[in-house]
Amino acid sequence: MSDLFFDESIILLNQEATTNEEVLSLMADNLIDKGLVKESFKPAIIAREKEFATGLPTKGFSVAIPHTDVEHVVQKNISVAVLKNPVDFCIMGDAESTTPVKIVFMLAMDEAHSQLSLLQRLMQIFQDESTLQTLATETSKETIKNLLADKLDFSLEGGE
């Protein structure tokens, strides 16, 4: 997974939010500020979440994997937010139900096939309760970066 940008600057810890839209806005604003996505990314990711929910109930902590179309992306990246308190996201495939999400993986891919590949790798993490526990409680952005880089098997670009 070459040319994927992933460093501590797009890992957000102990984030406070009360709605999923607030979470998505915080994360998108950070990516826009870093020049990794276009201004259009924020409204696009919020709109897509309303239409296609991304919450996933998992063992331990529920996760969400918001993403949107490739035309809003400048540099392929994955941003992670660990929330101070869980926020309800609608469940993928069941918009009538919600799950309390603690960890959000925001995907900004520049090609559809790379998004599918990353989603498959993320699903393996979501099935590993101990990894989710570590991600939810870890206070070091560097530790999270290294853990995810190892689990997702990609080389790191950006701040080392």
Image: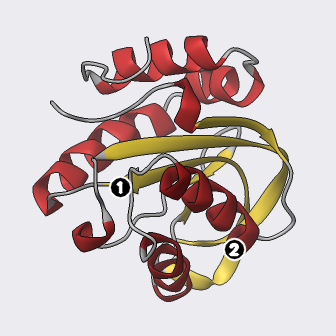
- Label 1 crowd bin: few (<14), some (14–19), many (20+), radius 10 Å: many
Name the spot of residue 92 as percent of width and height, x first.
Answer: 50, 71
Name the spot of residue 39 as percent of width and height, x first.
Answer: 46, 72
Amino acid type of disc 2? Answer: Glu
- Label 2 crowd bin: few (<14), some (14–19), many (20+), radius 10 Å: some
Tag 1 and tag 2, C-beta contact below 8 Å: no
Where does the N terminus fall, quadrant-wise? top left
> Quick check: 145 above or below 121?
above
Decide if residue 160 is on the left or right side of residue 21: left
Query: Image quadrant of residue 151?
Result: top left
> Quick check: 21 above or below 151?
below
Decide if residue 33 is on the left or right side of residue 154: right
Q: Which residue is mark 1?
A: 108
Helix, strand or loop under label 2: helix
Q: Which residue is mark 2?
A: 21
Name the spot of residue 69 as percent of width and height, x first.
Answer: 29, 73
Q: Depth check: 71 or 118 in front?
A: 71
Where does the C terminus fall, quadrant-wise? top left
Q: Residue at x 80, y 71 (%)?
A: 19
Q: Depth check: 5 or 143 in front?
A: 5
